[in-house]
Image (spheres, grey):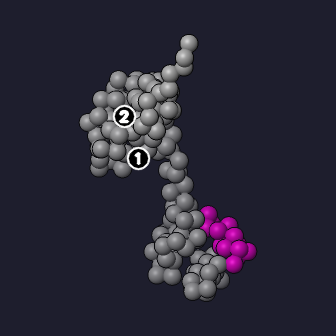
């Protein structure tokens, strides 16, 4: 029995009752030995459903060279390129670019450029920017809607 046949047998068996930890680990250890075609066949199998723990492992084996590189590329891009990624709503990197831009804004890097990009974006991005500006002006007490208390002196 080949690795693919064994994994497929186990996938069928555990489809309805859930995986046992030992068998799942054994099948996951066999995945790197499979060819790309075999991994694709297994990934598309009707016995491997969404949320199945083996499906994520198959995906990671299929795209192991790409997993994690996108995040690294986003972190190393300059702010202008990152803003372009943020504005490209069909590029698939909007949420990663948003997170990195927010981190850079909080760190004080290129605040003017990031503010302009967030002001021309969605309402939630505009609201996030307003909250950041309010925190800078009043500190955390300004977030409650109350005016900052004055210290008698």
Would you say residue 103 is visible in this rendering?
A: yes
Q: Secondary structure at mark 1?
A: helix
Q: Percent x, y for residue 81? A: 36, 32
Query: Is 84 on the left-hand or right-hand side of 148?
Result: left
- Quarter occupied by the N terminus: bottom right
Main secondary-structure element of the magenta-colored stretch: helix
Q: 106 or 145: which is nearer to us? A: 145
Q: Position of residue 115 (x, y in %)?
A: 34, 29
Number of other residues with Cα within 10 Å of mark 2, as a class: few under 14, some 14 to 19, many 20 or more: some
Residue linked to disc 1 = 95
120 relative to 110 in the view: left or right: left
The structure residue drawn at horizontal position 40% and vertical position 23%, both measured from the top left corner, is 110
Q: Position of residue 147 (x, y in %)?
A: 43, 30
- Quadrant in which the C terminus is drawn: top right
Number of other residues with Cα within 10 Å of mark 1, as a class: few under 14, some 14 to 19, many 20 or more: few
Q: Magenta segment range?
A: 20-33
Q: Which residue is mark 2?
A: 130
Spatial distance from mark 2 to mark 1, Cα to Cα? 19 Å
Task: Answer with left or right where residue 1 lies relative to residue 82.
Answer: right
Pair 2/1: label in front: 2
Q: Quadrant of residue 79?
A: top left
For image coordinates 55% across by 60% down, the residue present is: 60
Please say if 49 is above or below 146. Answer: below
Residue sitting at the far left = 120
Residue at screen point 69% across, 70% down: 25
Q: Residue furthest top?
A: 153
Please provide percent x and percent y for residue 29.
Answer: 68, 67
Find residue 115 and name its label.
none
Please tell me which residue lies in front, 58 or 97: 97
- Magenta highlight on residue 29: yes
Toward which corner of the image does residue 31 lie, by quadrant?
A: bottom right
């Amino acid at each position: 029995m080949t690795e693919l046949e064994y994994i497929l047998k186990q996938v069928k068996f555990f489809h309805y009752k859930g995986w046992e930890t030992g068998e799942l680990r054994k099948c996951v250890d066999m995945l790197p030995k499979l060819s790309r075609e075999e991994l694709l066949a297994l990934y598309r199998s009707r016995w491997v459903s969404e949320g199945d723990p083996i499906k994520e492992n198959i995906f990671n084996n299929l795209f192991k060279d790409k997993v994690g590189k996108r995040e690294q590329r986003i972190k190393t891009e300059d702010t202008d390129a990152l803003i372009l990624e943020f504005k490209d709503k069909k590029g698939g990197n909007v949420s990663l670019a948003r997170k990195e831009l927010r981190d850079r804004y909080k760190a004080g890097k290129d605040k003017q450029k990031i503010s302009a990009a967030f002001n021309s974006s969605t309402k939630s991005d505009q609201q996030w920017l307003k909250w950041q500006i309010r925190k800078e002006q009043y500190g955390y007490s300004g977030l409650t809607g109350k005016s900052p208390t004055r210290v008698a002196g």
